[in-house]
Image (cartoon, coloured by chain):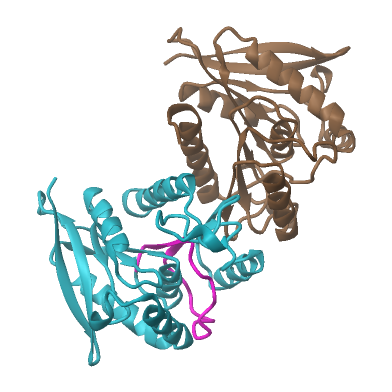
Chain colours: A cyan, B brown
């Protein structure tokens, strides 16, 4: 195995974005492509580490960017403003996600007929929006994602399989929002699954989560379980006819 | 592989029960024991088939009986009365489950330090009661189980890991009962997980479910997914330190 990375620049109109692609350079075969959508913090080492782990497992992973190249590495206040602006303009967010997906499709290592997307926190909302907008990806996986519906996708049919990995005590996605999401996804005809972890809060995959306020708390068991759950889902997407 | 079965009689006081044990006779090593708790219909070929599948995977499986040997094979009205009586007397149900667990422990093929229990529909309620009463089993798995709390276990600590496999549109376990279960299990300190399948109803593992009323509906994808999910849970219980 020889994991390589390169930056991938792509545009949405005038705006420039910079993703990071990770792949195993020891094979020439076309492989499934996986987007990795970032948290509120933008594209950081966290997403890159996940992209590398996916590459080790045989996927071509693109850690995407929806904030813009010049904003990578911005401090939390800037990131929060960027996120809030995109949450307030979901069609813009969805366009940027489509651009990232298009960039992934164009990478020569990628089998463009076999795509998936995963995302963490805000990135969970992003990958749900990829499904909601009807993009042709086999499946999406939300890790402790935000569930707020975008408001512009009702009536769409969702063709991507959906897996949401969720801490039951996540203050940013309380039981009411789980019920709302279930209703939304069922109404859109989605094949959806929700994996709930008891006694688990927001950001459970992030070892650097600031647990001081009780909102974001790393949970080693849920971190490991959710990654394995995602892999089982990918096996279903890419290796089996279920 | 050479799957064998034998009946196992056991008592709770004066009452006689008959389980069916399945194991692979080609190895002498002690192996984890798994109880298989039955639906409203009592111990039928359905539970025996699951016990045999578990035996093929290396477990020693006991399809238990909580209705009594003389009631095996009874018609649905008799079974419903037996179930209702046990749901109305949960301490009695819990005693019978303890007797079944004790019978499993005593089988010479079983590693009594590595036990689990799975159950379907009413059997899901049974295995949750095994956890609620603090029995020393590593984990329990409920397939489209009923969640009603027993009323006599509040204040107990649950040490068994719990996995509930649940159809979101199960009319016998609506979202309110999911929320209630989550609160109950978290309050008892349980390590619990809930796997939800969207657009799936009650009895989704049973190919013979009568779908005419919309309550019980077989779902091939959820059937297969839930079995694989259980196996991943067993790997966590018996083969890994998580």
Residue A156 within the magenta-colored segment of the rendering: yes
Name the quadrant of the N terminus of chain A: top left
- Report whether residue B215 is seen: no
| Magenta-highlighted residues | A137-163
Residue B31 within the magenta-colored segment of the rendering: no
Q: Is residue B209 above or below residue A215?
A: above
Judged from this view, the residue extending furthest toward the front is A212
Q: Nearer the viewer, residue B168 or B5?
A: B168
Please provide percent x and percent y for residue B41: 76, 34
Please provide percent x and percent y for residue B119: 66, 35
Dividing the picture into quadrants, the one containing residue B101 is top right
Residue at x 43%, y 68% (from the top left corner): A159
Please provide percent x and percent y for residue A81: 42, 84
Dividing the picture into quadrants, the one containing residue A7 is bottom left
Q: Is residue B218 above or below residue B112?
A: below
Q: Is residue B106 above or below residue B139?
A: above
């Amino acid at each position: 195995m020889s994991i390589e990375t390169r930056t991938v620049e792509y545009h949405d109109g005038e705006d420039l974005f910079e993703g990071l692609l990770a792949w195993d350079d020891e094979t020439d075969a076309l492989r499934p492509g996986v987007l990795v959508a970032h948290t509120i913090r933008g594209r950081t080492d966290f997403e890159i580490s996940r992209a590398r782990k996916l590459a080790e497992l045989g996927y071509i992973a693109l850690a995407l960017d929806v904030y813009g190249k010049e904003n990578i590495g911005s401090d939390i206040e800037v990131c929060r403003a960027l996120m809030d602006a995109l949450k307030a303009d979901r069609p813009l967010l969805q366009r940027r996600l489509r651009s990232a997906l298009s960039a992934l499709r164009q990478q020569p290592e990628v089998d463009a007929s076999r795509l998936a997307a995963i995302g963490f926190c805000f990135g969970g909302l992003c990958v749900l929006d990829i499904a909601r907008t009807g993009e042709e990806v086999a499946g999406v996986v939300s890790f402790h994602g935000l569930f707020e519906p975008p408001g512009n996708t009702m009536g769409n049919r969702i063709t991507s399989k959906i897996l949401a990995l969720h801490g039951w005590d996540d203050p940013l996605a309380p039981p009411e929002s789980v019920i709302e999401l279930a209703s939304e996804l069922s109404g859109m005809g989605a094949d959806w699954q929700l994996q709930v972890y008891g006694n688990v809060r927001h950001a459970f995959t992030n070892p650097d989560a600031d647990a001081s306020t009780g909102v974001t708390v790393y949970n080693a068991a849920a971190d490991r379980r959710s990654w394995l759950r995602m892999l089982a889902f990918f096996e279903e997407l890419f290796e089996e006819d279920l």
